[in-house]
């Protein structure tokens, strides 16, 4: 039996074991060794950027493939290499964080190799350049803006090293329809006409997301109420005007459609059409609001004209007249040259003291109003005879009854009568003339 099994082993099993051993890729048949003789590494797939195929930008990742060549003429891709089998000559420039994948970290140059079984591959030179733009994002997106308005756009570039930067001033802005919207070099979008368009930003060959732009009808951007401030005598009225300015630079009178809001209705009220009524002596403020936009705040002073108050009377055309000032009012604004004081008893004017003026100082009073920009005007002058008689008395009647003015004295006019000047009494319309040295009341007028 022993001789039989020995013969069987020599004839059958020994050749079979030899055959099995030859299946190992590192060995040949009949005990001949197959050795790794060369390794070739190359970028695959090629993802580098720049003039050289092996120039990477900071932040880029480049896969490499290693092919092993053997002594029997065969070759295969070496998939069993570890991170430690891949090498860089300059670790400051880049590194292998995973087998066969090189990550560029800093500008510079390095040489890459791979090793296995004591065999070192060919060398691959890699140049790492500054980071490049990989994407651009424009915000806001979408853009909804009213005609005439502007919207600042921001273009943010993301680079290959994962950093980002505002490049709004260096991209090329491209709106598809400049009749609807335009964009400045700095990214300021201007809404030109109602409609829709799109835009993009481009830099270094990279184009941003597409931004939809919707330009809607013009909207109110501001409301201005005039006159401001308002000084009105108790019991009198003052027409207010609310002017809306729109985003397309147009304007419109919206006095009838705003919401008028006086703070203290015990002092003054305002009708839906903007007519202010002075209820009681005191101070308040008011605003006008429309479409969510609130006007300037208007100070309202309701007073008797014997106090520190003056009536700036709008005859309806924008032409303004002032009553002769009280002592309290003229003193409160710093004064002007005067020539006496008259005390009204309440019969022809509100009870209180009022300054008197010769003709020269009546003109000086109007100059004082110009210096102070009274009522926002700088073209105050002494009223003419016809302005006092026709535009005031004939139109409004007794000015004490109509507006609470002092009227016991006549009012100087700028109209000469020889060496004298006409005067008009505003409680009965009586017209006479007097020497310029005589003293009486003065009304200044301002044309719109």
Image (tube, rainbow, N blue to C red):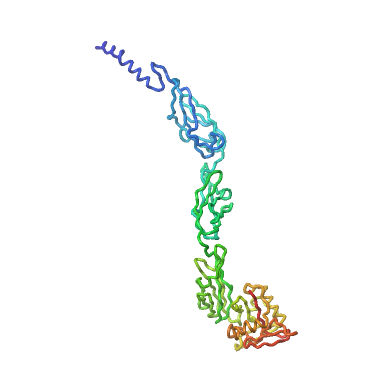
Asked if residue 102 can be seen in this view, the reply is no
As displayed, is residue 83 above or below residue 395? above
| Residue nearest the observer in this picture, 324 or 44 | 44
User: How far across and down, in percent of the image, does residue 328 sit?
Assistant: 63, 80
Q: Where the N terminus falls, by quadrant?
A: top left
User: How far across and down, in percent of the image, does residue 117 sit?
Assistant: 46, 24
Left or right: 442 in relation to 272? right
Image label count: 0
Q: Residue furthest right?
A: 419
User: How far across and down, in percent of the image, does residue 290 sit?
Assistant: 50, 68
User: How far across and down, in percent of the image, does residue 8 sit?
Assistant: 28, 13
Which quadrant of the figure has residue 14? top left
Look at 57% across and 80% down and name the residue there: 233
As displayed, is residue 12 above or below residue 196? above
Which quadrant of the figure has residue 327? bottom right
Q: Where the C terminus falls, by quadrant?
A: bottom right
| Residue nearest the observer in this picture, 248 or 308 | 248
Asked if residue 13 can be seen in this view, the reply is yes
As displayed, is residue 244 above or below residue 282? above
Q: Residue furthest top?
A: 3
Look at 58% across and 48% down and name the residue there: 170
| Residue nearest the observer in this picture, 52 or 190 | 190
């Amino acid at each position: 039996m022993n001789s039989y099994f020995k013969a069987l082993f020599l004839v059958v099993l020994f050749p079979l074991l030899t055959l099995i051993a030859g299946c190992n890729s590192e060995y040949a048949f009949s005990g001949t060794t197959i050795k790794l003789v060369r390794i070739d590494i190359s970028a695959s797939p090629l993802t580098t950027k720049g003039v050289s195929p092996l120039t990477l930008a900071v932040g880029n990742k480049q896969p490499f493939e290693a092919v092993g060549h053997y002594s029997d003429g065969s070759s295969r891709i070496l998939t069993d290499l570890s991170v430690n089998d891949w090498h860089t000559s300059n670790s400051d420039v880049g590194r292998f964080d995973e087998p066969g994948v090189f990550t560029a970290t800093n500008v510079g140059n390095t040489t890459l190799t791979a090793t296995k079984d004591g065999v070192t591959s060919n060398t691959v030179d890699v140049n790492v350049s500054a980071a490049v733009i990989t994407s651009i994002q424009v915000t806001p997106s979408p853009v909804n803006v009213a005609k005439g308005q502007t919207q600042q756009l921001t273009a943010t570039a993301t680079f290959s090293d994962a950093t980002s930067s505002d490049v709004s001033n260096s991209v090329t802005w491209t709106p598809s329809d400049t009749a609807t919207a335009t964009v400045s070099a700095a990214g300021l979008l201007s809404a030109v006409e109602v409609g829709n368009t799109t835009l993009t930003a481009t830099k270094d060959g990279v184009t941003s997301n597409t931004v939809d732009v919707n330009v809607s009808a013009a909207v109110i951007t501001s409301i201005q109420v005039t006159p401001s401030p308002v000084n009105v005598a108790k019991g009198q009225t003052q027409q207010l005007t609310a002017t809306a300015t729109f985003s397309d630079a147009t304007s419109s009178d919206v006095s009838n459609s705003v919401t008028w809001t006086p703070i203290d209705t015990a002092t003054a009220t305002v009708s839906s059409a903007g007519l202010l009524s002075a209820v009681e002596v005191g101070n308040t403020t008011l605003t006008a609001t429309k479409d969510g936009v609130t006007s300037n705040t208007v100070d309202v002073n309701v007073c008797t004209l014997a106090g520190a108050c003056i009536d700036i009377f709008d005859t309806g055309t924008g032409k303004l007249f002032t009553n002769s000032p009280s002592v309290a009012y003229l003193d409160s604004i710093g004064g002007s040259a005067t020539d006496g004081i008259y005390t009204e008893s309440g019969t022809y004017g509100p009870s209180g003291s009022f300054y008197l003026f010769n003709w020269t100082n009546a003109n000086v009073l109007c100059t004082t109003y110009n210096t102070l920009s009274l009522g926002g005007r700088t073209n105050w002058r002494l009223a003419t005879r016809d302005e006092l008689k026709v535009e005031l008395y004939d139109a409004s009647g007794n000015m004490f009854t109509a507006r609470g003015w002092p009227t016991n004295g006549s009012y100087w006019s700028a109209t000469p009568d020889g060496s004298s000047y006409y005067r008009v009494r505003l409680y009965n319309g009586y017209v006479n003339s007097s020497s310029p040295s005589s003293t009486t009341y003065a009304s200044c007028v301002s044309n719109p």
